[in-house]
Structure formats: C-alpha cells, structure tokens
Amino acid sequence: MTDLSKHFDHRAAQARCRALWDSTRAWHAEPLLPGAADGRVFSIVIPPPNVTGALHLGHALNNTLQDILVRARRMQGFRTLWMPGTDHAGIATQAVVERRLLEEEKQSRHDLGREALVARIWAWKEEYEKRILDQLRDLGASCDWDRLRFTLDDQCAAAVREAFFRLFKKSLVRRGKRLVNWDTFLQTAVSDDEVFHEEVKGHFWHIRYDVIAPQPGEPVSVTVATTRPETLLGDTAVAVHPDPAVALDAAEQDLRERRARASAKEQPAIDAALEDLAHRRREFLPRLKTLAAMARDGRQVRLPLLGRALPLVADAWAKPEMGSGCVKITPAHDPNDYDVGLRQSLPMVNILNPDGTLNTAAGPYAGLTMKKAREKVVADLEATGLLEKVEDRVIDLAHSDRSKTPIEPYLADQWFIRMGELAQPAIDAVTSGRIRIVPERYAKGYVDWLSEKRDWPVSRQLWWGHRIPMWHVAGVTEADLVAALGIRDTVAWQPDEAGGFYVCSSDEQFLVDTVAGEPLVRDADVLDTWFSSALWPHSTLGWPAATPELACFYPTSTLVTSRDILTLWVARMVIMGLFDTGEIPFQEVSIHPKILDRYGETMSKSKGNGVDPVDVVEALGADALRFALTGMATDTQDVRMPVDFQCPSCGHLIEQTTQNRTKPRLDCPKCSAPFRTQWAKTEADLALPRGPAVSEKFEAGRNFSNKLWNATRFVLMHLEDCGPEGVVGESLDADAPLEDRWLASRLASVAKAASSAIDDYRYAECARVLYGFAWDEFCSAYLELCKSRLADPAQRNRARATLLLGLDTILRLLHPIMPFVTEEIWQQLHAVAGSRRMPWDDPAATLPVSIMLARWPVPPAAWIDVRTEQQFATFLAVVGAIREIRSRQNVPPRSKVPAAIRTASDVTDLLTPMRSAIESMAMVDLVGIGPDVAALPGAATASVAGCEVFIDLAELVNVDAEIARLEKDNAKTAGFVKAKRAKLSNESFAARAPEAVVAAERAQLAELEDRLAKGEAALAAFQSRKASAGA
RNA sequence: GGGCAGCUAGCUCAGUUGGUUAGAGCGCCACGUUCACACCGUGGAGGUCACAGGUUCGAGUCCUGUGCUGCCCACCA
C-alpha cells in the first residue's frame, strides 16, 4: 500500500463517496409501517435556504450541524430522515429578478406583466435551486434527496391553502388597514425585517399653523416640527396633550426615577432634561393648557399651503416635554399618527401614488415625487412666512433592504392573522418544556415576542408567492352565495364592512367567477413567505393528507437554526404546527452561533467580507470546512472568522482590513497582479481572476484529514498480509499489553464523551475530543508504540487487531463530522481487513457497504480503567522528561544516550515492561529501570510523578544550562510548595474543605516536596561539578 | 428605552455542578527530513482570566457595580 499518496486527495474521495451514497441511497428513509414495533425515529427538516442566491458560510455551518446529528443517529440505529428543500423567499427573490430585469433589459415588472414575471422567477429558481442543492451535496449533506420539497410546489401549496382556509373558518383571519413600508422603487410593501435604518443628515423644520378665529388671550398659531415637511399635505389634525400639567409631572417623575439609578456618566444628561422640563413648565404650560381647552371646544387651525381647516385634537400622543408640545397628525403616513387618527376618528388622507409620486389629494403638488414635493413645500412655506426655523439634524431613515431606496409609510388594506388565541399554546409548549430550546437563554426572547400577541400581517403586494385564496364580491346576499357556491366544506365566507362578502376557498380548482351576476374577484396579493415556512415541518411530510411519513416522522426531533429567525420562523412553526396538527413541530431547537468577520461584523456578499464555502471545498475539502465549522459551534452567540485574501497569481496572503474589505478589486502587494475578491459588479471586474477569501481555520481541518489518511497508510502497510479473522477487540483481556488496555480504556471514554456531546448539541466539544484523541493519543502515542510490536512476530497479530479496532472506531466516531475522509479510509481499510467486525457490529449481518450505515461504537463500560490510564500518563511523562533534557542539552536527535530510571513503587509494574517503548520513543539505552536503580553520576536528571530519570550525557552535559534550568524549576516548585503549605496550615481549610480535597492537597504537597528535594540535590551536584571544573 | 450576550496567550476560541500548577489550534523561537504524515515530529517562550468590590477555607467559574464590544426588540413630531 505504499503506493498510496502521502496526501489525502479530497477531490477524488468526494466524488467516490457521493457516487457510493447516491447509488446505494444510503441517505433514504422509509417511514415505518403503521403498527410496526421497530422503534426509534429521528427526523429533521432543513431550514430551507432561499433560492435568492448561493449558500454562504452560515448555511454551511447550519447544514453541517444537521448532518452531524443525522449521521450519528442513523449510525445509532434510528430510522432517520433529513428532509431537504428550498424556500421561494417571496420579496427577496422577486426583488433580485426585478433588479436584473431592469439592469439588463431596462424593463419593469409592469412592462412584463404578472405571468411573465413569475415565469422569469421560476427560471431563476430552477437555476439557483440547482446550485444550492449541488452545494449541499458538495458539503456532504445526507438529506433524503428523493423527498426534495420547495415552499411553492404543489404539495406545499395545498398545505398553504388548507391552513389559510382553516384559519379563515375559525375567524382567525381579519381584514384591516395597516401602514406598510412602501418601497416606491419596487412598488411593493416590504416587511419590517426587510427594512434597514441608516443615519442621514436631514433637517428639522418648524412650521406655523395659524389658529382659525383666535379669541383674545388665545394663541394665534401653533408651531409643529417635522423631519418630513411634505407630509403636511396629508395632515388631518394637530394634537395637543389633553392635560399637559399631568403629563409634565409624569415626565418629571420618570426622569427623577431614572436619575436615581443612573450612572454618574448619564446623570448630567438627565439633569439637563430636568432643567428643560422646568423651563417648559414656566414658558409653555399656560399656553398648552389653553390649547388643550381649545381642542376640547373643537377649535381649528389652518393647514399651511392647502388651507384646509384641521381640528385641534386633545390626544396623549402629543408630548408636552417634546418640541413645541404640539404635533401634526398624518394618519395615512405615520404609524403613531394612524393610531391617533383611529382614536380621534380623523379622516385618513393618503397623498401617495404607488410609484412614489403625490396623488390628487396633494392638490397643486400632485405628480411630484416626494423629494421634489419636499423642496417645493419648503420653498412655499418660506415664501408664505410660515417656516419659523430650520435645524440640522441627523435622522434615522428607513430604507428598503431590497432596493436601497427610502421607505415611505403607506396605508393599505391587508389580511391579518389574529394571534390572541394562537400564541398562547405556542408559549406554553416552550414554558412547559415540551419544546426545549438549547441554549436555554433563547427561550426568553421567544416567549416575550409571542406574549405581545400582535396580529400577523400576511398580505404582500407581490407576484411571487402563494396567492391568497381569498375572493371578494359586492352587492350580493348570503342566499346568493349559497345558490352560487352551494354548501361545501372547501368554501367559507364572511361579510365585509360594505354589504359584500369575502370568500375563502381551499380548493385549487375554485373557478367560480360570478355570484348572482356580480364578479367574484380574487385578491391580488400573495402571502408572506413566512406563512409557507411556518408549515414546513408538516407540509413537507404530506399534510393535510394522512401520509405514512407524517405519522412516522412528525413531530420532528430537532430543529437546527440560528438565533435571528427564532421569532420570525421558529415561533410561527410552533403556532401553525399546533393549529394544524395539534402537535408541536419539533421537540428540540438547537441554536448555533453566527459567523462574523475579523472585525465582528456579519459576513455578507454585498460587503464582500465573506468566505464562499465553495472555495474552501475546492481548495481544502468539505471535511476541512466541516471540521472547522464544527469546532466553532459552541453555545456562544457569535464567533469570528478572520479571513485573508489569497492572490491567485502568486498565492500571497493579504490580510483583510477595514480598508480593503469592501473593495471588489485588489492588487497583490507582492506580484502586483490584480484580482477580484467578491462577486463582480462590473464587466471589468468579472474578467479578473478570483482571489478567494481563505482562513487558517480551515487548514487545521485539512491537516487533520491528512493525519487520519496517513495513520491509515501506516495501518494498511501492516495489515495487508493478514486475512479476515473474527471480531477484533476480543483479545482485550487482563493479559493484554498495557498499551492495548490503555487504548481500549480511552476508546470507551472517548466514545462516551463524543456521544453525549452530540446528544447535548455540544458540537465543538465533540470535534475537540475526537481531534485530541485521534492525533495525540492514537497517532502520537499508540501508533508509535506499535512500531516495535509490529516488528515482533510474537506480538504482531495482537497489535494489528488493536490498531484496526482503534482506527475503525475513530473513523466511525468522526464520520458525522468528516464524512468523506472517513468513508474513503473505511472503504480502503475494509478492502484489506475484509469482514473483520468490531465488537459492536451485528454478528449476524455482513458489514454494510458504507460507513454511513455502520454501527455507532458503544465500547463496554468495563473497558474504562482509570488506573491504567494514570499509569500510562506516567509513562508519557517520563518520555516527555527525557525528550526535554535531550532538547535542552542539544543532543543530536538520532543519537541514543544511556539513561536509567528509578521508578516510584506504584508504577514499577507498569514501567518495567515498557522498557523498549521508552527506549524507542525517547531515543535512549536504558541501563537500568526499577525502584532501586542507582543514580548515574554526573547525569542530567528529571523528576516526574515520583520517578527519577537519569540521562548520562558524559562530556556532553552543558553544566550552565542544567544549572539555569534547575534553578528556574526549583524556584517554581518552591513557590508551589510554599503555597500548598500555607493552604494546608490554614485551619479553616482543613476544617471546612471536603476530606477528599484536603487529602489530595496533602498528596500533592508530598509530591512537590519530593520533587523539590530531588531538584535541589541535582542542582547542588551540578554546582559542585562546576566549582571543581573551575578550580 | 427594554432585553441578551461577550471581554481568558499575538489571533480565533475551550474551560462541564467553585477544588491540583488555566488549555487547544494557528502564529512565534530552537532543533530535526529514520521507513504513516514537513498538510510532519520534538522541545520551548507566551496569560494580573476587562476593572472594582463582595460571598467562600478556596473564585476564570457565584453575587453587586463599572468600562468597552456586539446582537435582538421597541421608539425616534
């Protein structure tokens, strides 16, 4: 087998493994037949990636973790399903396609029309879905690829119609007006989550509204301030607080309370606010009181420019502690003003056209864009002298994440889902522990969010999505409806506010278009993407049909996700799962960290600070990527991934900095070749070679793959001439050599630790434990020890069997994290080792075709032997001490030096038979080993675990080096001894600490004192040697 | 404004219910290509566990406060 390459070829291995898994459909899961006895089931539904674009590093992490759980459970004998699929991602996908359409063809969606646009988006979806699925497969995701779903496919669509219909029938769907975030560029509403705020320089305009027919003693005008002066065209009132004195008192009270618990740093600001309040009390209060009285009398003010009379209303929204104390009310374009409008029964004047221009309600300003209108309004106000003051001010302006243009709040009719009844069971599911969220702290956010029970607006003014199964008809009676639609269980209706009806149907073939001659018109809107996502766990399994899959795999076992969609998605899945099926959708939720860049910022394609998982898979292999990501998956909320750019021409690494991070093009400082670091934005960039962002983190994973590969090469070299024979591990009796018993003990401990880490979603710990064991213990210690045994015919077979046991076990335990390298090696190992089975394999069955289906290692607890592990640790410490002396004394690595070991009595039994192992691992000739060995005169010495090591370096000894080192060592030991003595002489320690702790401390002190005595003796010997040499 | 995290070696992170001398990977220094692996081996240097108090025989770990960083939610005439 020496022809095997020294380096693991991840490309070839990945191709072979994928072919094997696909041809055997090792990832496929059949549901249990109803009533089947065979018990354990494990299922996961994938958080469906958006078809907006390719997968990023966060997806790679999310899917790696799911694959770890799925692969481990499958090996553990669970009937395991991982349901794959993608999400249509409503607005995100439509926006991407629309933007392209505009850029490439200069067309808007209105030029194309609904059907044609939707067809374009389907084409996009096909392209990206394919890319995404390829990426998942490249990553090694062992999804059941036969069951692929899409949130907009027929099966999911049927579930959406049925779920919406059931909600409607139970009166949980309502029609209402809501201020939507209107994207004037895309001409659609976007959800709050698709809005980002950006601070921009703006102004604060103070505008005078004259009071109509002021009485003597009354103010002749009120002043209001706004950052959006053009909205005054839609004003329908000016508000003042009904009781400004009370409001001021409350504000003052609040400030005083806050001051009491504020830090010294915050207090000056609060003091200033208090002072301002006092000033207002003196200067504004009488006037505000008068205005409040005027409001009660139904007095009016005149709207500037348009001249409309507006009522002065008394409403607590107007805060006397802010601005002038009066506020303009624009109900159709501001969320708070909308509430005031409802309370005060004000008219709602919408001044906006969908394209962002002003409509006829804006009078002479109609047709202008909001921006132009603002300029003209301000100019006109100035001209009429109604503009009192303009201040500069930084404003937090809402922008659409999709078009990057400013959002205009806009009042529109929407469908809502009432959350009152629905939320409570979802809260209870978590608080009662039926659903467990890991880490637990995230449960609070979930419960708090649901507790607000805010209605869920589900209408979206989009074309890409599930069309809302809702129709409207005006001017008919219920009898007409019954006549036209009959009584069927797929149709329901509710009266509207104006004598018409809303009709809902779950029937895809609902083709009625008139009722009693009146048109039945379908709602043009589609549903919020999260509506179909909320059904994902049951819709993918066939609901509302009673499929075997639903019966077997629902509720699912675990949901793996990141914290940012805990409310948007997780909470809604619980709500809808409970509503539709009466069951929770999953038992546990595993929340993993988010990957940030070197500077703690989220990675994104637009920023260009990310890593493309494809680059890593290409360069270093999927296993390297997965291992690195798994190692980062602790229960912290974020992890940082420092990234470098690699020059494609010369391979030079350029550290990512805040300066170069956002540049699409870099020039290599070494070879000055230009390259691009992110998705190209121009044709010129596209022509440049791509210089991928890389991270050292992945190299550790690649190195580990290679280590495993080379350990296998070693094992195979010695295995090739031994034929199949029985079960390995049976010879691990009390007579077995110490290193075999040690290995068995460690295997048992490690298997247990790895298993429980997976059970508890401690992914990183699983990776760490296995890495340390495989590298330091199996490769560095055990393999080294086997070298001499393999050369000895008497010991060879036993060593081979234990080597096979160790390697096979490591491969199986690591397989969930690193599926490709473990599969590849396992195949090669068993091509040579034949059908040799592990103790946990089914003796009646043949070895499976893939490690994916091999049994998870469960070594007997009896293998764990604490004493053996301790003794072995002493052995390693002795070897380490000798190596350290050799290094310090610059002994040439290949020369053997004479040495002796005086063993402590409790390890003599162990160390004596390890003589040749010590000799080979530490490169020494042992002239003596045992409890009574005499010190070698003039030797360098070390004291470890009660044993004394003597290394005869003859004339080689560097006396000064030994003295320096012993002095330093002794000083350190003396420090510990002192600390320990102090601790033990503390009476309360002896009295209060548990006995075991005290005893342990005593033992340590004894050992430290022993070591110190030996160290001092050695030092004295060298000092006298130096003195005599000098004399 | 409300809530949640983080602060441990140059960097990225571990550190299980308080209990030996606080660890890993990368990076750094020295030495080494003998036969699994230089994507390697051996050894080494490097930490006032953000800061200040407190509880305790004992604190990286528990409590209180402070500082800095980040995230979520709400709000911003």
Image (cartoon, coloured by chain):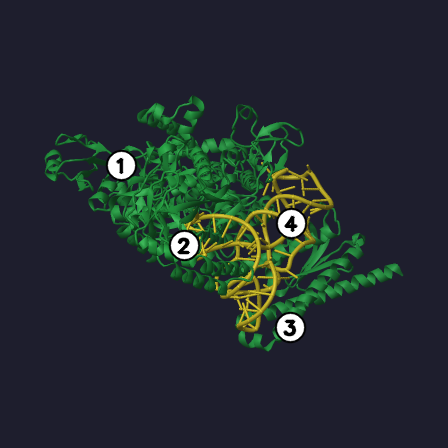
Chain colours: A green, B yellow
**Residue sitting farthest toward the right:** A1031
Residue kind at label 1, given as amino acid type: Ile
- Residue A558 image position (x, y, % from top left): 37, 48
Question: Which of the two discs, 2 and 1, labels the residue nearer the N terminus?
Answer: 2
Tell me the tag on residue A468: 1
Is label 1 on the same chain as label 3? Answer: yes
Q: Quadrant of residue A657?
A: top right
The residue wearing badge 4 is A921
* Along the line of sight, the residue nearer the viewer: A268 or A779: A268
Q: Is residue A700 left or right of residue A243?
A: right
The local crowd at label 2, few if under 14, some if 14 to 19, many if 20 or more residues have their Cα within 10 Å, is many
4 and 2 marks on the same chain = yes
Q: Are marks 4 and 3 on the same chain?
A: yes
Question: The C terminus of chain A is located in which quarter?
Answer: bottom right
The answer to whether the residues at label 4 and label 3 have Cβ atoms under 8 Å apart is: no
SS class of the residue under badge 3? Answer: helix
Q: Are marks 2 and 1 in contact (CB under 8 Å)?
A: no
Residue at image location 41% in from the left, 59% down from the top: A286
Q: Nearer the viewer, mark 2 or mark 1?
A: 2
- Residue position for label 3: A982
Spatial separation of the CA atoms under disc 4 and disc 3 = 39 Å
Badge 2 is on which residue? A319
Question: What is the number of the mark on residue A382?
Answer: none
